[in-house]
Structure formats: structure tokens, C-alpha cells
Amino acid sequence: MDLERLKQQMNFLHEVDKVKAILRKTMLFHQDRVENDAEHSWHISLMAVVLQEYSNEPVDLLRVLKMLLIHDLVEIDHGDTMVYDKGAQQNLEEEETARRIFAMLPKEQSAEFLDLWQEFEARKSPDARYATVLDRMEPVLQNLFRQGGTWPKYSITRQQVIGVNQWIALGSQDIWDYLEEQIHQCFDSLDKK
Amino acid sequence: MDLERLKQQMNFLHEVDKVKAILRKTMLFHQDRVENDAEHSWHISLMAVVLQEYSNEPVDLLRVLKMLLIHDLVEIDHGDTMVYDKGAQQNLEEEETARRIFAMLPKEQSAEFLDLWQEFEARKSPDARYATVLDRMEPVLQNLFRQGGTWPKYSITRQQVIGVNQWIALGSQDIWDYLEEQIHQCFDSLDKK
């Protein structure tokens, strides 16, 4: 065994623990607190396993899971940005963190993770498009299950929710059809208040 | 699309959110609080990806990840039990929860998850043995990185740590060799205090 190699990998696995401190903007389904990136990554990975049949295109589930398990590591240095606020600055910061953190691994693993993360961000493959379905769907579901959840708090409108999330349909038309109807029902009910 | 089927799956994915409230006995690497089951499941899934080369036997990584993503759902109803305390009663309770929670899914998914969970618990396949390496290794690492962490608090001895964790070697001799040496160094240093 190459002990130096194992130590590199262990140091990486120690470093990534920090995503457990990166807080998101949406609340858990069953507790009155916001979620952190590690909990989110676990939940959407399980979602990917359960909902694979709804992907528009055939996917390699193992690659999808790898993408989802690593996709938020890039927030370790600068925190989470709400999807409605994300701009060029955040993208640059995430790219920087991706390079720093994946470089902790042995060379070929580092290259594999950086490629997977870039593929996920670019959403140009069936695997990346399906991975994005879950990443986007979870906060939408959290807010739906909480009668709008944090949408009113951040003054997010129906048009924004639809606009930002509608390309879930690029990965799964079925799931988007389901969510879109629920989003309208939710905002119809908020509008009546 | 079969809407009833999708709703069943969504209800399952809503229910499993509860593992985010199941607190474990070990502390995070980078924060002074205990970990919850969702964070743990994410972390050991990523560990499984990074450390696959150290498995004694070839494994199907996708099956390993499925096992790790679902293995702690059985704690939703009764909480986490420290590995040093686990007895027949806990095993019965977990079996009961497994049957309840997986039954929320469509039949063939329910059967797949129950089989995977039972395979993991029985540790009788290469995939299950490798999955167990990660499940056991994480709390050991957490305590090692914290100069013994919660071992002194719960009066866990060197012999207990070695005894309970030594069959990590059944899944990965390399990782156990690495951990065993670190465990001895850790207790040597605790003994001097």
C-alpha cells in the first residue's frame, strides 16, 4: 500500500467535512431549521436512486451519484448562494474552490472529480441534466411541503420559481409536470391570503 | 406517467428527511457538535467512492452506495445506538422500521431496498463488507482526529475499539492496518495523561 496516497485521500475526506457547516436557504421537511449542504447532498443522492425511471434519457446512475456527492464541495470556502441570486462572481469563486479542494486528491482522482463537477455545472450530458433535476427539485419540494416555505421570506415570486426551475424539464419532463402543477397550487393559495 | 406511483415515491422521500434529526454519538471533524445520520450517510458514501481501491475484493460501487444511502433509515423510529452497546432489541426495532419505511415505496423498489439493507446487515457479500468499512471507519476517524474524541466520555477502552472495529479488515486489510496503528498511538497518548 502507498501510505502517502492514502494519507492524501484521508486529508481530503477530513477537509470535506466542512460542508456540514454550509447552511442553505431552505428549511428541512420535518424540523424548523435550515438544511446544510451535507444533508442536502445525501437526500438528493437518495432521490436520484428512487426516481431514476423519470429521467428523460437513460443515465449512468453511478456517475450521477458521484456528481451529487461532490457537487456542493465548491461552497466550502464561500458558502451557499440562492439559485435566484447566482451570478458570475459566485461561479468564479466556486471554480477556485473546486481546483483547490480536488487538488488534495491523487492526480487521477482529482481530474475525475473536476471533470464530473464541470460536467454537472455545464448540464450538457444526460447524467448532468438528471443530476440537476434532483438538485433543483429538493428546495422546491421543501418549500411546497411548507406552504411556500422561505419563498415569501425572500420575496420570490411565482414567475421566478417557474423561470429558474423550469429547465428541470430538460432532465425529467414528468417530474417538472408534477412540480409545476404543485407550484401553481401553492402560489394560488398564497395569493388568497 | 403513473401519478400514484410518483406520489408514493415522493412521500417516501419526504419521510426519510427524519434521519436528519437522528443524532449520533461522535462529533464532527470541524465543528463542536455531534453528527446526524444524514450527514454521516453522505460522508461515508463519498468515502466509498474515494477509497474503493482498498477493498479486499472487487465491489459493485453502485450497490455499495445504495446500501450506504439507505442503511440508517432504520434508525428513524428509535434513534441511533452506539456500536459498543448494540443488542438484540435494537436489531428487532431496526428490522421493524425497515419493513415500515421501505413499504412506502412501490413493490419492486421496496423489495430491492429491504434486500440491500439485509445484505448490508449480514455482511456476507463483498459489497456489504466494503460498505461496512466506511460505516465503521468514519466514527473511528472522528475520534482519532479529536485525540480520542468521545471515547473517554463513554469510557470506551482500547480493547473495545480494536475488538469492535477489527473486522473492518474483512472488507479492507489496508484501511484496518492504517486505523489500528492510529488507534494504538491515540490510546498511548491518552494513557500518558
Image: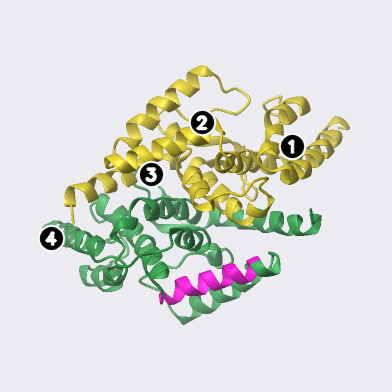
Chain colours: A green, B yellow
Q: Nearer the viewer, mark 1 or mark 4?
A: 1
Q: Secondary structure beneath disc 2?
A: loop
Q: In the image as oriented, which residue stretches furthest toward the right?
A: B192
Residue B80: assigned label? 2
Could you tell me the amino acid type at mark 3? Asp
Q: In the rendered structure, which disc, 2 or 1, sits on the residue that comes first in sequence?
A: 2
The quarter in which the N terminus of chain B is drawn is bottom left
Could you tell me the amino acid type at mark 2? Asp
| B100 displayed left or right of B177 | left
Label 2 neighbourhood size at 10 Å, few (<14), some (14-19), many (20+)? many
Q: In the rendered structure, which disc, 2 or 3, sits on the residue that comes first in sequence?
A: 3
Q: Nearer the viewer, mark 2 or mark 4?
A: 2
Task: For mark 3, name the chain.
Answer: B
Labels 2 and 3 positioned on one and the same chain: yes
What separation in Å lies between label 1 and label 4 (alpha carbons)?
Answer: 55 Å
Label 4 neighbourhood size at 10 Å, few (<14), some (14-19), many (20+)? few
Find disc 3 in the rendering and name its residue.
B17
- The reply to whether discs 2 and 4 touch (Cβ–Cβ < 8 Å) is no
What separation in Å lies between label 1 and label 3 (alpha carbons)?
Answer: 30 Å
Q: Which residues are magenta?
A: A109-124
Q: Nearer the viewer, mark 2 or mark 1?
A: 2
| B14 displayed left or right of B19 | left
Q: Position of residue B147 (x, y in %)?
A: 76, 40
Find disc 1 in the rendering and name its residue.
B148
Identify the residue at horizontal 64%, vertical 51% (top origin). B30
- The reply to whether discs 4 and 3 touch (Cβ–Cβ < 8 Å) is no
Labels 2 and 1 positioned on one and the same chain: yes
Q: Secondary structure beneath disc 1?
A: loop
Find disc 4 in the rendering and name its residue.
A188
Task: For mark 2, name the chain.
Answer: B
In the rendered image, the vertical position of residue B13 relative to residue B93, given as above or below: below
